[in-house]
Every structure is written in C-alpha cells, then in structure tokens.
Image (tube, rainbow, N blue to C red):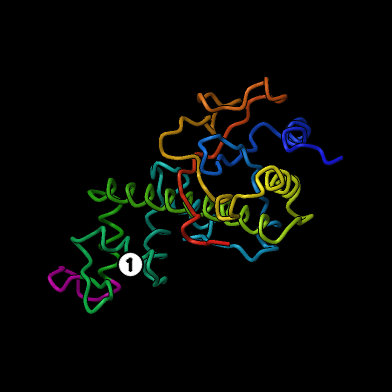
Amino acid sequence: MTRSWLTVLALAWAAKPSESCTVCGQLGDGVLIPWYKASQECLDVFNIKDQAIDPELLAQMFPNSDGSGGNAGAFVNWLRFTNNQVTDSLKASFPTYFVDVGGTMTFRDDLACSSTSACWTAFRGYLEDAGAPEMAAAGQALWARQASSREKEQALVHIRLCSDGPEEACEPLSTQVQDIRAENPDEYCSAFGLGPGSSKTLPDCDGPRGGGSNGIGTDAGMARRPCLATVAVVAALVVL
C-alpha cells in the first residue's frame, strides 16, 4: 500500500534538520500544502535553473538580505563586467550616473570624470558614501529577485514531477507529488505550481518551528515546519 504524503512528510521531518524549509503551495482550493523543498540534484535532473545571479557572488556583494554590509568594489565590478537585463535594471536605478542610450545603459555625458575607468571609480566612491542607501536598496532588490527565482524553480519542479512521473533524485518530494496527484486526478499539473496566495499568513522560515496560522500542526502527525512564503502563480507559464 502506498503511504500517504502526510506519513512520508512526517517521517522525513524526523530525519531532517529543523532549518530545512518547506515550500508552501496549494492546488487552487486555498488548502495549504507544505511541499518538500527540491534539492539542487533534483532541479538538475529537469534542467531547471532560473537564477538572476550566482548565489555565491550575491553573498559576496551583499551578505545580508536587507542590503546592509555590501561590498561596493565587488558590486561595481559585477556591474562593470556583466551586461544583461539584471545589471541594466540596476544601473537604471542610479540615474545620477547612468542613462539609457539606444537600449544600453551608459554613463551620463555630464559626469565630471575623464574616462570610463574614472567614472567607475567615482561611482564606487559614491556608493561608499552618499549613495550607500541606494546601494543597500539594490542589494535588497537582488535578494528579492533571487528568492523569486528560487520559488519559481520549486514551482516548476512540482509541475514536472506531476507531468513526467516519479524521480528518485527528487525524493521525498517525488512521492509527495505522486500521492497528491493520485488524490486529485482531475487537477491539471499546472496547478501544482501554484503558490499559497497573497492573503496567506505563513510560518516564518527563520523561526525555529514556524508560527503562522497556516502552519502544519501536530494534529497532522508532524511538528510544524517553516515555509518559504512564495506567492507566485506559475500555472500561467506552463499548462500541461
């Protein structure tokens, strides 16, 4: 007999460290589902990757998610030698220094610097002084974007496990998805990528046991687990 996903979740909880977050979602009915968090190995099986920036580089530039304690030198070097949509959007958040010229963010012509290199040096000095609050805001934006990317990755792997079937590298999430799929045979697999909804009060991922009103209590046969507070709806991206 196949064990229910609640049983599997309870057994895995006993073996996992408390800081391991679950990913909260639902199937469109408002009933919170504490999905297991897919490992990197699991994501790699399905070639799922949606990161705005390398996590190690992000931590080097901004060690704190509130943008404080940022490394201006590392941030400037990344902006200088990386050209993509993310860096362009960040440059645009510093209109005192950058302007859009033909779709490319470049230094303003009216800056008092003699060369491109000198402008980058001046920009770094600005970030270390008067522009520190703006740099912190950029760090916050990057962390928020990274969190959104990770949530999207988790949502996409739910959809793939539903549509493609079990995958050993994704246990125990794989068994959880298959069990819930069996219990809801009429649901489109796209529903497995839904977030919990913006109105949900979720357990705090930083808390030792979580605490929101939608936490999973001991009446479900397990200790309450913290959740990643995703509110994204990915179903609109993929319909299977």
- Residue 3 versus residue 159 in the image, above or below: above
State the SS at label 1: helix
Which residue is drawn at the image coordinates 52% and 54% (left, top)?
A: 152
Which residue is drawn at the image coordinates 24% and 59% (left, top)?
A: 94
Instruction: Provide the residue designation for mark 1.
Output: 88
- Residues 231 and 139: in front is 231
The quarter of the picture where residue 45 lies is: bottom right
- Residues 174 and 54: in front is 174
- Which region is colored magenta? 108-117
Residue projecting furthest to the left: 110
Q: Is residue 56 shown left or right of residue 148?
A: right
- Residues 51 and 110: in front is 51
Q: Quadrant of the N terminus?
A: top right
Q: Is residue 159 shown left or right of residue 174?
A: left
Residue projecting furthest to the right: 1
- Residue 202 versus residue 94 in the image, above or below: above
From the top left corner, tell me how far across and down residue 114 is, in percent: 20, 75
Q: Is residue 104 shown left or right of residue 15?
A: left
From the top left corner, tell me how far across and down residue 176 is, in percent: 71, 44
Magenta span contains residue 111: yes
From the top left corner, tell me how far across and down residue 206 is, in percent: 54, 32
- Residues 139 and 125: in front is 139
The amino acid type, in three-letter code, at marker 1 is Asp
Q: Main secondary structure of the magenta part?
A: loop
Magenta span contains residue 205: no
- Residue 126 versus residue 23 in the image, above or below: below
The quarter of the picture where residue 165 lies is: bottom right
Crowd rating for badge 1 (residues with CA inside 10 Å; few <14, some 14–19, many 20+): some
Which residue is drawn at the image coordinates 28% and 45% (left, top)?
A: 133
From the top left corner, tell me how far across and down residue 193 is, in percent: 55, 51
Q: Quadrant of the C terminus?
A: bottom right
Which residue is drawn at the image coordinates 27% and 50% (left, top)?
A: 134
